[in-house]
Amino acid sequence: MEKLKYEKPVISKITAGVPSKFGLPARQKIISEIDGIPVSKLMEEYGSPVFVFSENTIRNTYAEARQAFETRYPKVQFAWSYKTNYLDAVCNIFHDEGSWAEVVSGFEFEKALAIGVSGSQILFNGPEKSEKDLTLAINHNACVHIDHFDELYLLMEITQKLDKKARVAIRVNMDTGIYPMWDRFGFNYENGEAWNAINRIMLADRLELIGLHTHIGTYIMAPSAYAIAATKLANLLVATHSKFGHWLKYIDLGGGFASKNTLKGAYMPGSETCPTFDDYAEAITNALISSEIPHENLPTLFLETGRALIDDAGYLLTTVLANKRSSTGRRNMVIDAGVNLLFTSFWYNLGVYPSKSPSEYLEETTIYGPLCMNIDVIRDAINFPHVKTGDQLVIERVGAYNVTQWMQFITYRPNVVLIDLEGRSHVIKKKEDLETLKNKEVKPE
Amino acid sequence: MGKQRIRLAVTGLNNTDSPGPGVPFIRGVKESDIFDVHIIGLVYENLEPGIYMEGLCDRIFQIPYPSSGSDELIERIEYIHQQEKIDVLVPNFDAELFSFMKNEERLRKQGIQTFLPTLTQFQEREKHRLPEYGKKYGIRVPASLNLGSLGQITEMEDKFDYPVMVKGQFYDAIQAGNKEQVKQAFMKISAKWGLPVIVQEFVSGTEVNVVALGDGKGNTVGAVPMRKQYITDKGKAWGGITLADEKMLELTRSVIGQTKWRGGMELELIKTRAGEYYLVEINPRIPAWVYLAVGAGQNIPEALVKLALGMEVKPMQAYKIGKMFVRYSYDMIVDLEKFAAISMNKEI
Amino acid sequence: MEIVKEVKISENGFVFNSKTGDSFNLNPTGLALIKLISEGKELDEIKKEFVSAYEVDDLTFEKDFYEFFTLLKHHQIMVQSDPLEFK
Ligand SMILES: Cc1ncc(COP(=O)(O)O)c(C=O)c1O
């Protein structure tokens, strides 16, 4: 006699009023392979957990973004936001596609130089730039995006000392209708501070003002906010020309396009509500083209898009360690990847999927990481099928910020793998071992 | 001539103390002289009273919340369509409108008609955009400020005197009389509804509302103004009376005319002592008190169904003034079987 | 330990506990299992039946059985008065 298909026996309470989704015909998405390589094979080869990046997705996403802007505007230049993901292999793909580098620290600057990016194609942002960093930037002819007056005066000092010219832009903050307004970086537009800074720079001998920069926030769902930002920067550009007869070369609108992840607290999935590159491009380029800048003087449009370009390309493969019941009967699952690897789980409801066909029934589940800490929660409530210890799961859209903000805590950080365009996998960052960690430790004599 | 048979799917059967408009909508359509309706009730929860009301729905199906993804919701509707053949679908929750608006074309291709606002119409009326809305369409709205953080309270204090109304993007409104109360309201609302939190200047006056229907070409097909006579602690009208207020109707026609509003709507207004009207909110759907309009002579639900079916509808202008509604609560005795059926089979 | 007498189990998997007023939902394996439990059968016997009827191995079933059992106790479908009683 043929045996019946087994499914874990479950009983679940029918909550009056709010239905549990348990029992509704489930349509569970499965991720069984990445770019043609089975998840099981990747994990067999590289261990668990493991980050996997798809070169194909990176290039396709980049091409999509580029096309959205280049079909609408004559001069567009992306600058890869290093902080989003500065693994050499990843940066190389972006540079190969034509991206410049956008860095926010001396370390990132050095990393970009080491990869082989020409200094003149590095945009140097951020509130923390030491005299040493600025000297490095000036010597490499990078463009320094000035954050505050103290930095402006420091630059004047250094350029005098070096007797060299510095190419600069200012970062501008402004009200674009976005909450909260990021007014801690740069010079404010509305109160005239930005205009003051421009005037001060235009009068400085060794500072060459070439652009204007803003970064209005991150995960911005409203393309209209960018239209406002573009318009305000265009106003400054026109004002600079009227007063000084000088057309600035570029307007840099920073990053901030939403990736398709779902923010905690959002009602609808991000994949449905987030604007497309076309939506952003339409808003931005319309604002620039319809500004008072004459067509032949339109500035180059720089974009420092981060998460929207890389989130989709990154996966974290993980293994189920245990299934348990809480004291209240709630289903808990422990996996071998914790919040130390998934910083973005603090603000996203990350998508977690089985890698093979699971049980038919879903049950509301809390997914915990393996850390011996109470905050280690990957998903606090997700309808999830029943899976067994040892089953392999895939967490999607983790390409941005996780492999830069991860923490080494109680265990080694895992391998990071890249699948190339031919479908071959490569380790691009090796799993740590005791040596890696002990290397920098020093016993007091 | 016999009545036209139609199969109508309706959500929002939650006739609780914060009621959805589904049940009154169905009542309205059932009184139609031209339609003979087969009602397919769509519910999210297994205790929505509409499930248990005798003679209200012919079939009932449970549907997944839109938050689990529009696709899942729409596929469920398609499954129901295969069994029941839906002619017209009337969603009644704000939260589901987005999914249905996005999929209007997909549903239409299969023969399911809806009559909903466009995404632009829906979005520009959002609460935190009210000042722009007012400016664009020449409507008086309370001054407001969107708070992104507590740091902006000083800015707010420069602009407004206390008390102020502190509101969530989607829901909730708390009156605050001083800085401390604003802070508390901000925390509470931002935790639930996210940012921005909207602070509105307090406009004192009477709350008056209009239920209206726009045909999408700028015509107001129906409009009935009402004053809430009794408001529950949930802020819902428990009793109301139709008004003879030409100004409110003018304002309604002006909004619908300029925006070419498509579908049902509710305008929430405050009428000051001085006789000025402030628009405080536009709900992008028919309100739960729509049956008052039916009782006063404007069968707005029927007209909405006609519009959805592409039929010609003449604007309704007359309505009885001084008609009242009083809500009541009523305990139905029901058997466990119905509860078991909807919980287990997800349909009745 | 037995299933509380106030609990009614229907053929479609709907469970109603008239003592607490709670209702529950069983999946098909859950329904099959609760029936065996209500017949008063012990784990070993139930396990034998399950393993021969379903595509499942001993250990997996045992784990699932205990989890299911915990849930029955949690939902007061079975009662355990002494927390040290082992079942
Ligand atoms: C100056 C600057 N540019 C670009 C980015 C990248 O932003 P996103 O990942 O939101 O696109 C950031 C991120 O914080 C930033 O600070």
Image (cartoon, coloured by chain):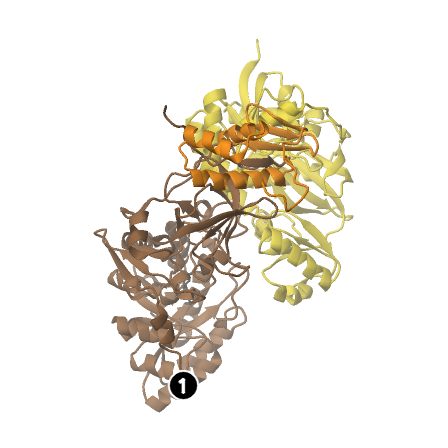
The x, y position of residue A313, in whole percent, is 34, 54
Within 10 Å of the Cα at label 1, are there few (<14), some (14-19), or many (20+) other Cα atoms? many
Whether residue B193 is visible to the viewer of this picture, yes or no, is: yes
Q: Residue furthest left?
A: A422
Q: Residue at x 29, y 79 (%)?
A: A140
Image vertical order of residue B292 relative to residue A267, above or below? above
Under 8 Å from ligand 1: the CB of mark 1? no
Whether residue B316 is visible to the viewer of this picture, yes or no, is: no
The x, y position of residue A262, in whole percent, is 47, 50
Out of A289 and B323, give the one closest to the viewer. Answer: B323
In screen coordinates, is B19 left or right of A79? Answer: right
In screen coordinates, is A140 left or right of B119? Answer: left
- The quarter of the picture where residue B248 lies is top right
- Per the image, the residue denoted by label 1 is A156
Image vertical order of residue A331 relative to residue B159, above or below? above
Q: Give the quarter the ligand 1 occupies.
A: bottom left
Q: Color of chain C here? A: orange
Give the position of the N terminus of chain B as an image quadrant. Answer: top right
Disc 1 element: helix
Q: Color of chain A here? A: brown
The chain painted yellow is B
Image vertical order of residue A340 relative to residue A396, above or below? below
In screen coordinates, is A76 left or right of B69? Answer: left
Image vertical order of residue C16 relative to residue B200, above or below? above
The x, y position of residue C25, in whole percent, is 57, 32
Give the position of the C terminus of chain B as an image quadrant. Answer: top right
Q: Chain of mark 1?
A: A
Out of C46 and A354, give the one closest to the viewer. Answer: C46
- The quarter of the picture where residue A400 lies is bottom left
Tag 1: amino acid: Met
Q: Residue furthest bottom?
A: A161
